[in-house]
Amino acid sequence: MATVLTFCVIISLASFTGPAAEAEAASPYGAKAVEIAASKRGAPYVYGATGPREFDCSGLTLYAFRKAGRVLPRTADEQYEHTRHIGRVQRVPGDLVFFPAGATIGHVGIYAGHDKIWHAPRPGTRVRLERIWSGNVRYTRAT
């Protein structure tokens, strides 16, 4: 009987360490920002654009968080400097994912869970959900 009970507790705890737990841990602002970014799927990348129909990378994060009730600075560098830095193991949907480019930040997206981000990649592309393609990323949380 004790082994069956122990097994059930282990299985129950294991179910809270996967993607479902990741989604549950998202802040209300982060979860809303993911939803808003997802609603912009297909919007064209335009350098300097902050929405609602066109975006650059930091314009999408700015727009999504503003609509979710949080204010971010305009550029990816400023967003990185003004949000709380966290480790990879702490990331949850709604956190920001930054891609360094030398001494600056070259790109930003919104973590969607399952190693994917919502982002506006570059000129000639559209807002999309994409797997994180690099191990050289930094995570922050807008609090």
Image: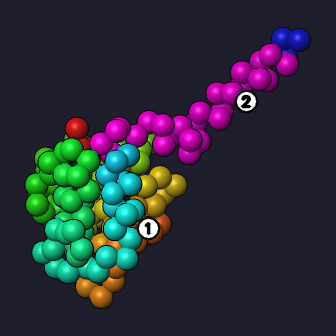
* Nearer to me, 65 or 105: 65
- Mark 2 vs mark 1: give the one in front: 1
- Range of magenta residues: 4-30
Q: Is residue 55 above or below residue 26?
A: below
Q: CA distance from mark 2 to mark 1?
A: 31 Å
Residue 13 lies in quadrant: top right
**63 with respect to 112 (left or right):** left
Q: Amino acid at mark 2?
A: Ile
In the picture of the structure, the residue carrying the numbered disc 2 is 11
Q: Is residue 139 visible?
A: no
Question: Is residue 25 within the magenta segment?
Answer: yes
Q: Position of residue 73 (x, y in %)?
A: 10, 54
Q: Is residue 33 visible?
A: yes
* Mark 2 / mark 1, whichever is N-terminal: 2
Q: Position of residue 16 (x, y in %)?
A: 59, 33
Q: Is residue 71 above or below residue 108?
A: above
Question: Is residue 132 within the magenta segment?
Answer: no
Q: Is residue 120 above or below residue 140?
A: below
**3 with respect to 136 (left or right):** right
In the picture of the structure, the residue carrying the numbered disc 1 is 129
Task: Bin the neighbour count of mark 2 within 10 Å (Cα to Cα): few under 14, some 14-19, many 20 and up.
Answer: few
Secondary structure that dominates the magenta span: helix
Quadrant containing the N terminus is top right
